[in-house]
Amino acid sequence: MGSPLGRWVRHAWHALGSDGRWLDATARQHIAERIAASEAGHGGEIRVCIERALPAAALRQGVSARARAQACFGELGVWDTAERCGVLVYLLLAEQAIELVADRGITQRVPAAQWQALVDGLGSALRGGQREAGLLATIDALDALLRAHFPLRDGQANPDELPNKPVLR
């Protein structure tokens, strides 16, 4: 990861950036729409959180991208779904980190290698400059997992427990 000073510099540099430069309003709307369409077909919830940089307190404490993703999972209420099948797609731009955090209802059913394949696919898309397409493809892959493991019963509707709009910080 480099030196602690280098980490601070990367985070300070990214903190100066604009949310709209990394993912414009149109792309954010497409992502929200794709999440809404996905959730209409299963009992799960999908959230996307993109952080430019860690807060200074987290940097001082040496918080990892994974630990921060887990904190965001809690802060955004992804853990608090009826069937315990929420999934957070977390990006930490300053560290080029991708984390998928899923609630216990889905992690018990999906092997770690499958989660890693999703991370690898998104990473490849992002390295190729395909931000929106990569996020949409990841949402589609999560949709397939959630439909397989948490299908809606006849006449059942997803209560859409969480907002669909990506969180940019």
Image (cartoon, rainbow, N blue to C red):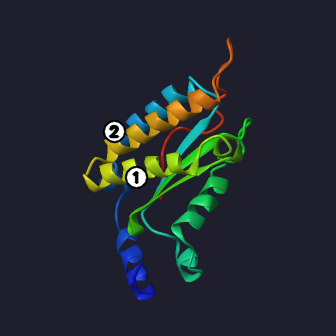
Residue in the image at 54% along x and 44% along y: 47
Report if residue 25 is visible in the image.
Answer: no
Q: Residue at x 67, y 47 (%)?
A: 103
Q: Position of residue 50 (x, y in %)?
A: 46, 55
Residue type at the position of mark 1 = Asp
Quadrant where the N terminus is found in the figure: bottom left
Of residues 13 and 155, which is closer to you in this image? 155
Compared across the picture, whether 21 is left or right of 55 comes to left
Left or right relative to 99: residue 74: right
Nearer-the-camera pick, 75 or 84 = 84
Spatial separation of the CA atoms under disc 2 and disc 1? 25 Å
* Element marked by disc 1: helix
In this rendering, position of residue 70 left or right of residue 80:
left
Q: Could you tell me the amino acid type at mark 2?
A: Thr
CB-based contact (under 8 Å), mark 2 and mark 1: no
* x and y, in percent, of residue 64 in the image: 54, 71
- The image quadrant that residue 135 belongs to is top left
Q: Is residue 46 above or below residue 123?
A: above
Circle 1 packing at 10 Å, graded few (<14), some (14-19), many (20+), is few
Mark nearer the N terminus (2 vs 1): 2
Question: Residue 63 — which label?
Answer: none
Report the residue at 39% width, 82% height from top. Answer: 2
Residue corresponding to mark 1: 120
Kindly give the residue lying farthest to the right in the view shown.
82
Q: Image point 38% across, 49% down: which residue?
A: 122
Is 62 in front, or is 161?
62
Residue 92 appearing in the image: yes
In the rendered image, which residue does mark 2 sit on? 26
Q: How many marks?
A: 2
Looking at the rendered structure, the secondary structure element under dot 2 is helix
Residue 134: x %, y % from top left:
35, 44
* Residue 38, position as x, y percentages in the image: 51, 29
